Image (cartoon, coloured by chain):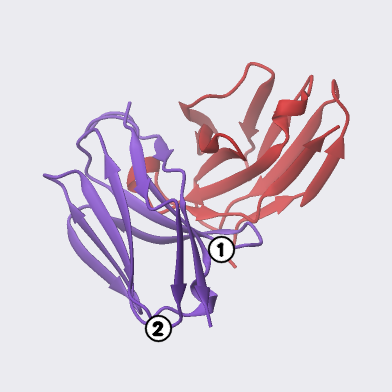
């Protein structure tokens, strides 16, 4: 158990809908990272927050947005969903702000299926 | 942007065999991560290394910064080692981008 929690575990929804994925980092970790893992693309970095502020941005679509709250939990909002958004979404956390240079602890993931 | 290549894509071994998984990248870096993804989907960080060698139990990770190459070795492999092993590096040069880019993974199956 990494100490990172994600809800929900599974989400099935229809095209055009909006969903919210939730992540609670390990106690003491200030950084939260969001990743998307699809069958054809592998793991891809979406966005990082550090202590409430956006720190780094990857290949995140404009239809997707995220935020980190004062209690450090984070939410990833996906809107106008398309079939291609079906994927595993992972949240990870680390103590420091330098994503590539800190060990990251991964949550169990949310499996999103868009029908 | 850093490009990450892993080999082999798939690996089948018999219990007890010595396993080697390779990772090459295109841009000089100062940190490399090895991750393990279980059949159920969960991801565990195995190592983060910037030089030399690290060992944890039966797992050994090495990195050669000059050759832009890292290897993950598993000694005395066991069926519970069956998983996908993923290499990840910073997307830019040293001191630059701090986002991770990932290899496509090596799927390891260890048969009893």
Horizontal and vertical percent position of residue B107 = 50, 57
What residue do we see at 39% from left, 47% from top? A96
Q: Where, by quadrant of the figure, is residue A20 drawn?
A: top right
Above or below, B34 relative to A91: below
Q: Which mark is residue A2?
A: 1
Against A29, is B26 above or below? above
Count of marks placed on residues: 2
Counting from the top left corner in percent of width and height, residue B87 is at 38, 50
Residue under the image location 27 percent in, 58 percent down: B71
Against A9, is B75 above or below? below
Horizontal side of A114 relative to B29 (left or right) equals right
Given residues A16 and A25, the one toward you in this image is: A16
Expressed as whole percent of the image width and height from the top left, the position of residue B24 reads 27, 44
Q: Which mark is residue B16?
A: 2
Neighbor class of circle 2 (other Cα within 10 Å; few <14, some 14-19, many 20+) is: some
> Chain A is shown in which shade?
red
Left or right of A109? Residue A43 is: left
Are tags 1 and 2 found on a single chain? Answer: no
Identify the residue shown where x is 66% and y is 50%. A109
What chain does mark 1 sit on? A
How many angstroms separate mark 1 from mark 2 (CA)? 28 Å
Colour displayed for chain B in the image of the structure: purple
Q: Does residue A98 appear in the picture of this structure?
A: no
Q: Residues within 10 Å of mark 1 (few under 14, many from 20)?
A: some
x, y percentage for residue B30?
Answer: 22, 44
Would residue B18 be visible to someone looking at this image?
A: yes
């Amino acid at each position: 158990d990494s100490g990172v929690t994600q809800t929900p575990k599974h989400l099935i929804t229809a095209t055009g809908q909006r969903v919210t994925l939730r992540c609670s980092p390990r106690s003491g970790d200030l950084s939260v990272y969001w990743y998307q893992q699809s069958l054809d693309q592998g793991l891809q970095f979406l966005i990082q927050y550090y202590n409430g502020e956006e720190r780094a941005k990857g290949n995140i679509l404009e239809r997707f947005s995220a935020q980190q709250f004062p209690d450090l939990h984070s939410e990833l909002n996906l809107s106008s969903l398309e079939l291609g958004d079906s994927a595993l979404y992972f949240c990870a956390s680390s103590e420091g702000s330098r994503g590539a240079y800190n060990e990251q602890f991964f949550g169990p993931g949310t499996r999103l299926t868009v029908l | 942007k850093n490009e990450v290549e892993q080999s082999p894509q798939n690996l089948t071994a018999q219990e007890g065999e010595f396993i080697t998984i390779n990772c090459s990248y295109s841009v000089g870096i100062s940190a490399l991560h090895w991750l393990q993804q279980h059949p159920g989907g969960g991801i565990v960080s195995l190592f983060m290394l910037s030089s030399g060698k690290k060992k944890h139990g039966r797992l050994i990770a090495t990195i050669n910064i000059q050759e832009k190459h890292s290897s993950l070795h598993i000694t005395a492999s066991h069926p519970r080692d069956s998983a996908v092993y993923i290499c990840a590096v910073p997307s830019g040069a040293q001191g630059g981008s701090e986002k991770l880019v990932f290899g496509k993974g090596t799927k390891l199956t260890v048969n009893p």
